Image: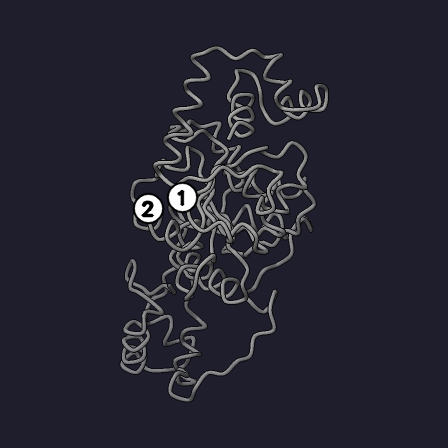
Amino acid sequence: MKDLFERLLVLRSPGIGPAKYNELLKKFGEIGAVVDVLNPSQALRDAVMREIDRAHNLKVSFVTDQDECYPAELKRVKNHPPIISMRGNIDTLCRESVAIVGTRHATAIGMRFVSDLAGMFARHNVAVVSGMAMGTDTAAHVGALAVPGNANTIAVLAGGVDYIWPVENEKIYDEILERGAIISDMPVGFVPNGTNFVQRNRIIAGIGNKLILSEADSNSGSMKTVAFAMQYGRQIYAIPSHPADSRAVGPNSLIRSGNAILCQGPDDFFNIQKNESKNEKKSESENVILDKIGTIPISESVLAEIVKKTIPEIKRELVILELQGLIRKQDAGYVRV
């Protein structure tokens, strides 16, 4: 308890971040000596004690980089957080993990792809790391949580580990708390500002041994996460998207520049056996139609012309695909979901 208190005292001191913390520890040899040199005020000591008490009441654990369960890949990052706080299942931090990131304004088809991919990682006992934001992050967590069992996903927060943001994801937060891990390097109870999200992205990139980028525009926070992952020597994968969509700029540019590997699905990572039952297969005709539908709305008449069918025939098969949740109507046409 004394060691944790002293480590937090140093980290919560003004102007002390991971780099300065490590510098002081190296210079003075032990954390107690660093505290003596800094001579923290009584107000700071009281604040740290309140944080520890709040953490205890919320069942928050403090994990130092001296602990066995501190994420192994993150520990290899220079000036990693010396202490992270955690709620949930600590075993999740011991698993191999992959980071999946992308825009908050993801398309339905993009979110479906990410969710399915995350689920496949979870089935292979790989924890999916993301930032619990709307859109891509949500799809990644939900896909991992759809797989039975625990320790499938890690949410890295920009605020304190007890600060739920966005509020719309409270249900997901609760499920991750029950079956995964929620972590942060910020004080318990801390309300984040803009700069904290950059730090969160640094941690996401550091934890995963590889990073997968879904839809993202060129100036998004996800591209900053990619930059961190490249700096750490992580393998980068990018999911391509339609070039007319601004959300395709990030992944498509990485693929074109050779900085990312083209990600086309679970087969890029696992040897997946295709065992669809006869009843689960779509008819050959439905498959042909589905293959022609993408993220840009396409009308019944255009589809009929492409696949050489009558409009009544097309209508029947579109109804079946819509009932299966594979397509939906949009702007006088159909898009894939």
Q: Position of residue 242 (x, y in %)?
A: 49, 56
Q: Position of residue 270 (x, y in %)?
A: 60, 69
Give the residue displayed 41% in from the left and 33% down from the top: 160
Quarter of the rendering occupied by the C terminus: bottom left
User: Where does label 1 land, which residue?
Assistant: 133
Asked if residue 298 lies left or right of residue 226, the reply is left
Judge the density around disc 2: few (<14), some (14-19), many (≥20) Cα neighbours within 10 Å: some
Give the residue displayed 37% in from the left and 37% down from the top: 162
The answer to whether mark 2 and mark 1 are in CB contact below 8 A is: yes
Quadrant in which residue 143 is drawn: bottom left
In the image, 36 versus 22, the foreground residue is: 36
User: As shown in the figure, which amino acid type bears the numbered disc 2?
Assistant: Asn
Asked if residue 25 lies left or right of residue 163, the reply is right
Identity of the residue furthest to the bottom in this view: 278
Give the residue displayed 31% in from the left and 75% down from the top: 318
Q: Is residue 237 above or below residue 4?
A: below
Q: What is the spatial separation of the Cα atoms under label 2 and label 1, in whole angstroms?
A: 8 Å
The number of discs equals 2
In the image, 130 versus 263, the foreground residue is: 130
User: Where does label 2 land, which residue?
Assistant: 169
Judge the density around disc 1: few (<14), some (14-19), many (≥20) Cα neighbours within 10 Å: many
Q: Is residue 313 above or below residue 298?
A: below
